[in-house]
Image (cartoon, helix red, strand yellow):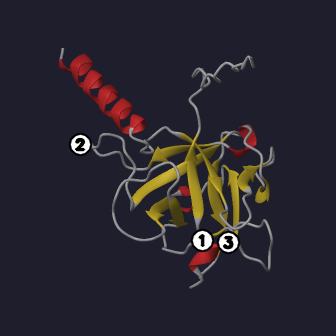
Amino acid sequence: MLAPRFLGVVAAALLHAAAAGDVVVGSRVFFTVPRTGRRLTTEGNGYMHAHWNHTGPWQRFVVEEVTPLADSDGTLTSGTKVQLKAWTGGYVGHEDTLVAARDLGLIENQQWTIALAEGGDGPIQSGSLVIFRDASGVPMVVDDPEHPGGITVAPTEDMSKLKLIIESTPSRGAAPTPTPAPTTTILP
């Protein structure tokens, strides 16, 4: 009978982390390129780019932890190994230097270390600037002016080409935030 109690504690921890703005395992997120305001997008064939600023299903990713830790409350912290699942069901990975969301059959190339762009080992929160590095430590390049909108994996010292803003999205079925009713003013 410990399992239901344990699951209740884990669920409470996840709710607390989510309420605090932390990104947790299983979160649905958007990634925005700060310089352009455009979001990472996955097309139906798995091709990825950052040409659009939409916030639809093609821009959503689910963050999955590669090796869950038993003592973790589900909060992602800088240095966590993750996989990013696109709406297509494919995982974001790379073949040579091209980043795409497909079943590449190379699980190692679909694992990323997420880190706070400014360093440190704190929690990843909605609105944080983050970078991704593959299993070999090579960064995901998302803002290369020489290849606008392209997403690649390539060595670079230019941190501005690596930064993404991670934004939590509402969970499926979550009620939208109500809009306040308009007020009228009666003038005498």
Disc 2: which residue: 71
Circle 1 sits in a helix, a strand or a loop, which is it? loop
Instruction: Judge from the rendering whether residue 37 lies leftward or rightward of residue 80; answer left or right.
Output: right
Q: What whole-number distance in Å separates the C-alpha atoms at marks 3 and 2?
A: 35 Å
Is 123 placed above or below 44 here? below
The answer to whether the residue labelled 2 contacts the one labelled 1, judged by CB atoms less than 8 Å apart, is no
Residue 77, position in %: x, y?
A: 37, 55
> What's the residue at 37%, 49% (across, down)?
67
Q: Mark 2 vs mark 1: which is more N-terminal?
A: 2
Three-letter code for the amino acid on which mark 3 is drawn: Asp
Q: Which residue is mark 3?
A: 96
Q: Nearer the viewer, mark 2 or mark 1?
A: 1
Tell me which residue sits at (30%, 33%) in the image.
13
C-alpha gap between disc 1 and disc 3 = 18 Å
Tell me: 40 left or right of 19: right
Which residue is depicted at the point 80% across and 43% down? 44
Q: Quadrant of residue 1?
A: top left
Q: Which residue is mark 1?
A: 162
Q: Which quadrant would residue 188 be assigned to in this image?
A: top right
